[in-house]
């Protein structure tokens, strides 16, 4: 349907108003996403997430209008990939990325697609008997042998590096080996929040590793605070305990009697007396 100038202008203003009303605005790449999966995704995400599919030119015009309320939003136009669409959310950007990633499903590779990551064919025995398959595998750089009557791949091999185009030979071999390196779903390219743009490389974090790093950093911070005798609410009780132990140690060594040191000084004297008695007997 062809829109008139007035309709385009009204649509742009409406989109700009929506952009201004959401704290999180993102760009998704919908290339290679079948209509059936798109409808399923939109149904799942309905509520906290809104997907807007409009032409690039209308997006860019809407960005300019929304710039006064969303500084920096026009920079999203430089992040368009494949078939770009807008995603609007009130979720945390990292939670949004995790939600979209969890709803992706594996898919076979097709010639001409871009590898999302390094595509590796692992070593091991295949279900194929020796025959034309050997030359097919060799055609993509795989070394083979025959094990128990079946063709085996000798070494792991990266057949297409991340960001490179998957050629027809590689796509065919991957399909025959039942390797599905692609993902079907909404591919979140980046989001903007409070004027800061986060790319997928920042948003795609391993929560277990991230938590481990935070815990390690916290331990290091406490250790540094202790060594520097820098009091905080987390180290005050530890510093007092450390100071008490050190002060008590000095008092015991100096034989300064008080209610805290007397038992230790008496025990120390007893040990020394026993040691002396043993040395002289």
Image (cartoon, rainbow, N blue to C red):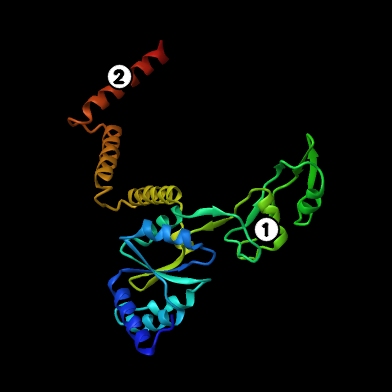
For label 1, count other residues whose C-alpha is less than 10 Å away and answer few (under 14), some (14-19) or many (20+): many
Residue 208 in the image: x percent, y percent? 43, 47
In the depicted view, which residue is nearer to us: 116 or 276?
116
Residue designated by label 2: 270
Q: Is residue 28 above or below residue 214?
A: below
Residue 79 in the image: x percent, y percent? 48, 74
Q: Is residue 154 above or below residue 266?
A: below
Q: Can you say which quadrant of the picture contains the N terminus?
A: bottom left
Residue 205 in the image: x percent, y percent? 45, 55
Q: Earlier in the sequence, mark 2 or mark 1?
A: 1
From where the camera sits, is residue 198 visible? no
In the depicted view, which residue is nearer to us: 236 or 258?
236
For label 2, count other residues whose C-alpha is less than 10 Å away and answer few (under 14), some (14-19) or many (20+): few
Closer to the eye: label 2 or 1: 1
Quick one: which residue is furthest to the bottom in this view? 5
Do the CB atoms of the residues marked 2 and 1 lie less than 8 Å apart?
no
| Residue drawn at x 38%, y 80% as measured from the top left | 63
Residue 45 in the image: x percent, y percent? 36, 58
- Alpha carbon of mark 2 to alpha carbon of mark 1: how far? 83 Å
| Residue drawn at x 70%, y 48% as measured from the top left | 156
From where the camera sits, is residue 190 visible? yes
Disc assigned to residue 139: none
Left or right relative to 278: residue 133 = right
Residue designated by label 1: 171
Quick one: which residue is furthest to the left in this view? 259
In the depicted view, which residue is nearer to us: 255 or 81?
81
Residue 171 figure quarter: bottom right
Secondary element type, mark 1 = helix
Q: Is residue 21 above or below residue 229?
A: below
| Residue drawn at x 48%, y 55% as measured from the top left | 104
Q: Can you say which quadrant of the picture contains the C terminus?
A: top left
């Amino acid at each position: 349907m062809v829109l008139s100038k007035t309709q385009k202008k009204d649509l742009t203003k409406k989109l700009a108003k929506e952009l201004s009303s959401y704290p999180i605005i993102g760009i998704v790449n919908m290339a290679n996403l079948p209509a059936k999966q798109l409808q399923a995704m939109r149904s799942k995400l309905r509520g906290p997430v809104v997907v807007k599919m409009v032409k690039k030119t209308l997006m860019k015009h809407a960005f300019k209008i929304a710039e006064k309320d969303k500084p920096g939003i026009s920079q999203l136009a430089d992040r368009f990939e494949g078939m770009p669409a807008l995603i609007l959310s009130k979720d945390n950007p990292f939670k949004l990325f995790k939600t979209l990633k969890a709803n992706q499903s594996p898919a076979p590779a097709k010639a001409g697609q871009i590898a999302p990551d390094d595509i590796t064919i692992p070593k091991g025995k295949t279900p194929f008997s020796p025959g034309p398959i050997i030359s097919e595998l060799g055609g993509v750089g795989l070394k083979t042998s025959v094990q128990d009557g079946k063709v085996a791949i000798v070494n792991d091999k990266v057949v297409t590096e991340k960001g490179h185009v998957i050629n027809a030979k590689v796509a065919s071999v991957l399909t025959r080996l039942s390797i599905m390196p692609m993902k079907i779903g909404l591919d979140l390219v980046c989001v903007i929040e409070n004027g800061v743009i986060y790319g997928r490389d920042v948003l795609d974090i391993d929560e277990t590793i991230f938590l481990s790093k935070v815990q390690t950093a916290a331990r290091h911070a406490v250790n540094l605070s202790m060594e520097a005798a820098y009091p905080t609410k987390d180290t005050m009780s530890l510093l007092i305990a450390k100071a008490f132990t050190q002060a008590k140690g000095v008092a015991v060594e100096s034989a300064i009697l008080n209610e805290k040191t007397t038992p230790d000084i008496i025990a120390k004297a007893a040990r020394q007396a026993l040691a002396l008695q043993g040395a002289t007997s």
